[in-house]
Amino acid sequence: MSGDRQYIPIATIVLSLTLFGIDLILPLGIAIAISYGFVVFLSSLSSDARLPIVTAAGCSVLTIVGAALSPTLPGLPWWLGWSNRFLSLLAIWAPVAFIHQRRWAESVLREANDGLEQRVQERTVDLLSIQQALQQSQRDLLALTGRILAVQDDERRRISRELHDDVNQRLALLTLSVQAAEKHLPAAPTEVREQVAKIHQDLVTLSNDVRHMAYRFHPSILDDLGLDAALQQTLDDFTAHTKIKTLFVSQPLPPILSKEIATAVYRVVQECLSNIARHAQATRVEVELTVEGPSMELAIRDNGRGFDPDAGLRNGRGLGLVNVRERILAVEGMCDVRSRPGSGTEVRVRTPLTVGAP
């Protein structure tokens, strides 16, 4: 297109001289001027903004010269020819005014577009900065959540150890003391022996409760035998208390599995089992633990009544699932809950084997 525009000045010169030659032969007057106006419009196609003005000036000179040299019709007053030439000049310069107005409007529009693009770019940069700040805040929040959960788990582990190693041992010694005292009371009144026997039974019950409490705070089996053994024990206890059948399937877990990941997965299973016992009305629960490359996947399925996860969150009754997601996000994992009323529930969790792994 730019190659074609370089011939426009030559074309305007040729057309102008052709029209001038016709003007010298025929007394066309204003018709020639209108043709000059076409030549001015043609010159506006050039990339040179000055060419329409130069062309209009040249056509004006040719029009004035043509007025003096072109033939006139007999009987017409002299002023009629010159008035036609004056109108011809208006017809020549009118396109110049139109072209100038159009280019001025284009310039204003171009400046407005440039300003708009500049503002859009600035706004885009601002939004990008805000997005990066939000992402950084989210990363900081996840890191803080992870540290809080780690401290919480450490505190749970400490309390569990204290309950098991200190309080429960004291209760065991106290139980042995009461049992020994009970043997030395053969001649005591029946009421005394029954009271001592009841104290002995209460101490045994309290000792069992403390042991179960310590296990709920942090199962020592998780540290001693690993995640799969701890999950199996949890499911066995769940079946014993709820009469809900459970099935646990697990692949051999790699030794690189970190303590943070194991604890997070264990707590997720605990939370899901608690929700199933309270709400699902299920008769069967399946827990599957698999390893795929650098990741571990946990699936918890039940055949309960199901629910609408989005509606539960809107109604504020999905705090258990919120806790599950936050705990998994804190160890750089992902959580997906699939459920609908009448179709059971499946919770799928995917985590790395170690925190900070690619």
Image: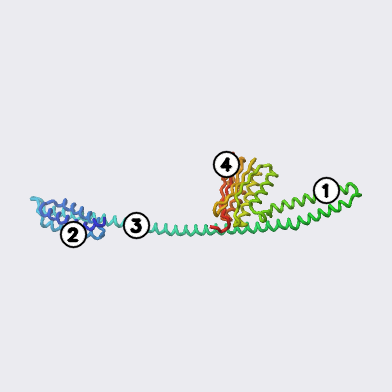
Gap between marks 3 and 2 measured at Cα? 31 Å
Helix, strand or loop at label 3? It is helix
- Tell me if residue 316 can be seen: no
Extreme-right residue of the structure: 187
Q: Of label 4 and label 1, which has the lower sequence position?
A: 1
For disc 3, the neighbor class at 10 Å (few under 14, some 14 to 19, many from 20) is: few
Gap between marks 2 and 1 measured at Cα? 126 Å
Helix, strand or loop at label 4? It is loop
Say which of marks 2 and 1 sits in front: 1
Say which of marks 3 and 2 sits in front: 3
Give 33 or 139, whichever is nearer the viewer. Answer: 139
Say which of marks 3 and 4 sits in front: 4
Return the x and y of residue 281 as percentages of the image width and height. 64, 40
For disc 4, the neighbor class at 10 Å (few under 14, some 14 to 19, many from 20) is: some
Helix, strand or loop at label 2? It is helix
Are the residues tagged 2 and 1 within 8 Å (C-beta)? no
Q: Of label 2 and label 1, which has the lower sequence position?
A: 2
Are the residues tagged 4 and 1 within 8 Å (C-beta)? no
Residue hosting label 1:
198
Q: Of label 3 and label 4, which has the lower sequence position?
A: 3
In the picture, the disc for residue 58 is 2
Gap between marks 2 and 4 measured at Cα? 84 Å
Q: Of label 2 and label 4, which has the lower sequence position?
A: 2
Q: Of label 3 and label 2, which has the lower sequence position?
A: 2
Looking at the rendered structure, the kind of residue marked 4 is Arg
Residue hosting label 4:
340
Return the x and y of residue 354 as percentages of the image width and height. 58, 57
- Tell me if residue 247 can be seen: yes
Residue hosting label 3:
110
Gap between marks 3 and 1 measured at Cα? 96 Å
